[in-house]
Image (tube, helix red, strand yellow):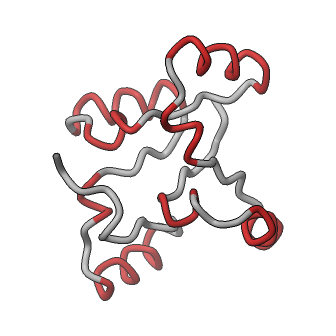
Amino acid sequence: MTGLVLLTETLLVLNPRKRRAIQKMTGLVLLTETLLVLNPRKRRAMQEMIGLVLLTETLLVLNPRKRRAIQKMTGLVLLTETLLVLNPRKRRAMQEMTGLVLCVSRIFKAP
C-alpha cells in the first residue's frame, strides 16, 4: 500500500535534522518511535490523516507465514527480529543482496 521499507529504531531516534538529511539521501520516509507506540485509537486516527499504515512493534515478531501474508496484502517490507540480530558481516552482505537497509542488533531484544 505504501511501498515503504521501515527502518530500525536507530533511525527512529535520530534527531529531526539528521532524519531529514537521511530522507533526502535515501528517498525513504522514516517513521519515528512515537508511531510504534501509539495506542490503537490514536494510530487509526493518524493512519486516516496521513494515509500510511503504521507498524506496531508486534509486526517485528510475527511468525514467517503471517508476515508473508501481511507483506503481500500491504506491499510493505516488514523487518523481522532475525534481521535485527545479524552480525555486521552478514548484515552488509544481505543489504547488498536485497537493497534493504537492515536493522542493527542491539535495539529490539526478545522479551
User: Where is residue 24 shown, x and y percent of the image?
Assistant: 83, 67
Residue found farthest to the bottom: 89
- Seen in the picture, residue 38 relative to 93 is either above or below; the reply is above
User: Where is residue 103 shown, x and y percent of the image?
Assistant: 41, 65
Residue 12 is left or right of residue 81, and the answer is: right
User: Where is residue 88 shown, x and y percent of the image?
Assistant: 32, 84
Looking at the rendering, which quadrant does residue 47 occupy?
A: top right
Residue found farthest to the left: 111
User: Where is residue 109 shown, x and y percent of the image?
Assistant: 23, 56
- Seen in the picture, residue 50 relative to 104 is either above or below; the reply is above
Residue 107 is left or right of residue 63, and the answer is: right
Q: Total marks drawn?
A: 0
At 58% from the left and 61% from the top, the residue drawn is 13
At 44% from the left and 66% from the top, the residue drawn is 102
Residue 6 is left or right of residue 81, and the answer is: right
At 48% from the left and 58% from the top, the residue drawn is 9
- Seen in the picture, residue 57 relative to 16 is either above or below; the reply is above
At 54% from the left and 28% from the top, the residue drawn is 38
Q: Can you say which quadrant of the picture contains the N terminus?
A: top right
Looking at the rendering, which quadrant does residue 42 occupy?
A: top right
